[in-house]
Image (tube, rainbow, N blue to C red):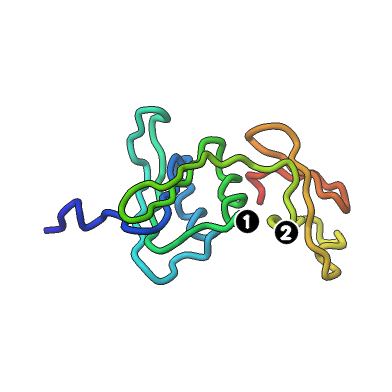
């Protein structure tokens, strides 16, 4: 039988407060699975949010670009960095006002899909997020991305 201590994170990342049903999308955004253990909780009870998903990954430390992608999943997503078995830092993710190279424009005739140009979007309002492509001005909802 597996003991709870077998699931303790020694060094890695905990992605918490994901909206229910988004854990698989979070894994996909991060290109997981990679080497090392991954724990996924789906539809887990949460005192603050009712229900949530959670992902714990041993040996993973997120880059800013990865955090920005995860922030698209919901307004309360948090990331905890674990070092030596303890939380070293915790951040509630926020979608930046401008996203560069994070999203792909859904407009097939946008220059970002035709030329080697990095995509650029401006966030419009709060969750549920909408974004306007800086080049073709197409507006896209985060649910469609």
Callout 2 secondary element: loop
Q: Residue 9, image x and y in percent?
A: 31, 55
Q: Residue 124, image x and y in percent?
A: 75, 36
Q: Which mark is residue 17?
A: none
Outermost residue, top side: 48
Q: Are the residues tagged 1 and 2 within 8 Å (C-beta)? A: yes
Q: Residue 143, image x and y in percent?
A: 63, 44
Circle 2 packing at 10 Å, graded few (<14), some (14-19), many (20+), is few
Residue 31 falls left or right of residue 132: left
Q: Residue at x 37, y 46 (%)?
A: 87
Most foreground residue, 121 or 43: 121
Most foreground residue, 97 or 132: 97
Q: Which mark is residue 101?
A: 2
Q: Residue at x 36, y 53 (%)?
A: 40
Residue 111 falls left or right of residue 26: right
Q: Earlier in the sequence, mark 1 or mark 2?
A: 1
Most foreground residue, 90 or 119: 90
Distance, label 1 to label 2, CA atoms, is: 8 Å
Residue holding disc 1? 65
Callout 1 secondary element: helix
Circle 1 packing at 10 Å, graded few (<14), some (14-19), many (20+), is some
Q: Residue 136, image x and y in percent?
A: 88, 52
Q: Is the residue 101 above or below the residue 94 in the image? A: below
Q: Residue at x 72, y 40 (%)?
A: 130
Snapshot quadrant of residue 110: bottom right
Q: Residue at x 42, y 54 (%)?
A: 13
């Amino acid at each position: 039988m597996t003991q709870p201590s077998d699931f303790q994170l020694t060094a890695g990342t905990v992605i918490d407060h994901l909206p229910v049903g988004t854990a698989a999308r979070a894994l996909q955004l991060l290109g997981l699975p990679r080497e090392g253990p991954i724990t996924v909780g789906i539809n887990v009870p949460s005192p603050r949010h009712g229900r949530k998903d959670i992902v714990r990954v041993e040996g993973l430390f997120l880059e800013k670009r990865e955090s920005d992608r995860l922030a698209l999943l919901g307004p309360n997503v948090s990331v905890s960095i674990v070092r030596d078995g303890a939380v070293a830092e915790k951040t509630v993710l926020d979608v930046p006002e401008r996203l560069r190279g994070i999203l792909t424009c859904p407009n097939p005739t946008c220059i970002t899909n035709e030329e080697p140009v990095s995509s650029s979007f401006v966030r419009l309002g709060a969750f549920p997020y909408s974004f306007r492509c800086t080049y073709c001005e197409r507006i896209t909802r985060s649910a469609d991305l």
